[in-house]
Image: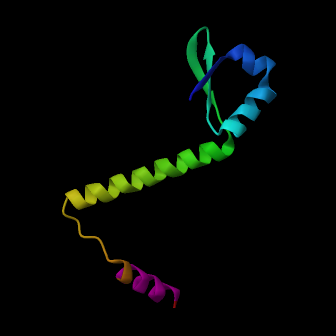
């Protein structure tokens, strides 16, 4: 469940907010004047999110290549090419 807090909590209770981010492994949304303004999250959560975005980007590229009729290479062929480059 999303946690939404006012910016005054970030100023006055930063340590508690950081503990929530780590304990709950969820971002905390910060409001300013009643409107969304910032997101605070643990570095681990951020890195997982970035990894997922990169995976989705790569999957999108693969789907676009497939839709265009582009032929990829098989797993065995890829590893054979890599072995040749290593030698």
Q: Is residue 44 above or below residue 71?
A: above
* Residue 36 point in image, percent of width and height: 56, 18
Residue drawn at x 75%, y 32% as measured from the top left: 18
Q: Is residue 3 left or right of residue 9?
A: left
Residue furthest to the left: 69
Q: Is residue 84 magenta-colored?
A: yes
> Which quadrant holds the N terminus?
top right
Between 33 and 22, the one lying in front of the other is 22
Q: How is the image coloured?
A: rainbow
Query: From which residue to which does the magenta span run?
Result: 77-86
User: How far across and how far down the image is residue 20, in percent?
Assistant: 71, 32
The x and y percentages for residue 69 are 18, 63
Outermost bottom residue: 87
Picture layout, residue 1 above or below residue 77: above
Q: Is residue 66 left or right of residue 26?
A: left
Tell me if 63 is positioned left or right of 42 in this view. left
Please name the predominant secondary structure of the magenta segment in the image. helix
Task: Answer above or below: position of 41 versus 35.
Answer: below
């Amino acid at each position: 469940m999303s946690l939404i807090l006012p910016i005054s909590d970030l100023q006055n209770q930063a340590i508690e907010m950081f503990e929530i981010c780590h304990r709950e492994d969820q971002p905390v949304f910060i409001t300013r004047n009643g409107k969304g303004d910032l997101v605070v999250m643990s570095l681990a959560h951020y890195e997982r999110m970035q990894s997922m975005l990169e995976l989705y980007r790569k999957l999108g590229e693969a789907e676009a290549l497939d839709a265009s009729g582009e032929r990829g290479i098989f797993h065995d062929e890829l590893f054979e090419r890599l072995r040749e480059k290593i030698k």
